Image (cartoon, rainbow, N blue to C red):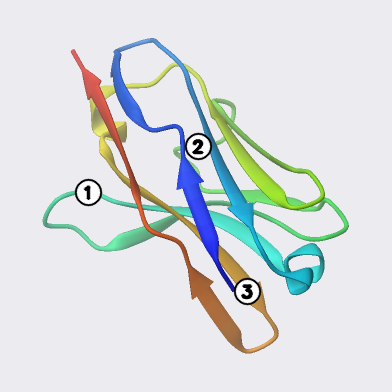
Amino acid sequence: VQLQASGGGLVQAGGSLRLSCAGASSIFRTSIMGWYRQARGKQRDMVATITWRGSTTYADFAQGRFTISRGKNTVYLQMNSLQPEDTAVYFCNAQYGARSYWGQGTQVTVSS
């Protein structure tokens, strides 16, 4: 499973970014898709997940500011009201049964 993440960048505090992750596999459509992030020196944390039926879960820090959605072969993460503590490498993930696939990360940097 190939996952290609994009959309990261540098933004000022209070700004917005939209991350995208394109999947190049038929199993993508029935996988639980998710976004995770890893700040420097910290563990990787779940940001949001979405099932193939559209059910979503969010980390507490993402609730109300971030929105995960998915299209046929792409999963998105709309991030609003970004803060410096949101600075991290963001990874997309596809969970298909017991198998977990990761895309390369995309850097999000929020300046104060």
The label number, if any, that marks residue 62 in the structure image = 2
Label 1: how many residues lie within 10 Å, few (<14), some (14-19) or many (20+)?
some
Whether residue 91 sits left or right of residue 63 in the image: it is left
Which amino acid, by three-letter code, is at mark 1? Ala
Residue furthest out toward the left? 41
Residue in view at x 57 percent, y 48 percent: 21
88 shown above or below 97: above
Which amino acid, by three-letter code, is at mark 3? Gln
Which numbered disc, 3 or 1, marks the residue closer to the eye? 3
Q: CA distance from mark 3 to mark 1?
A: 22 Å
Residue furthest out toward the front? 24
Q: Position of residue 38 (x, y in %)?
A: 28, 53
Q: Earlier in the sequence, mark 3 or mark 1?
A: 1
Label 3: how many residues lie within 10 Å, few (<14), some (14-19) or many (20+)?
some
Q: CA distance from mark 2 to mark 3?
A: 20 Å
Q: Which quarter of the rendered picture does the C terminus lie within?
A: top left
Which residue carries the number 1 mark? 39
Whether residue 27 sits left or right of residue 12 in the image: it is right
Which amino acid, by three-letter code, is at mark 2? Ala
Residue in view at x 25 percent, y 63 percent: 43
Element class at badge 3: strand
Element class at badge 2: loop
Which residue carries the number 3 mark? 95
Q: CA distance from mark 2 to mark 1?
A: 15 Å
Element class at badge 1: loop
28 shown above or below 46: below
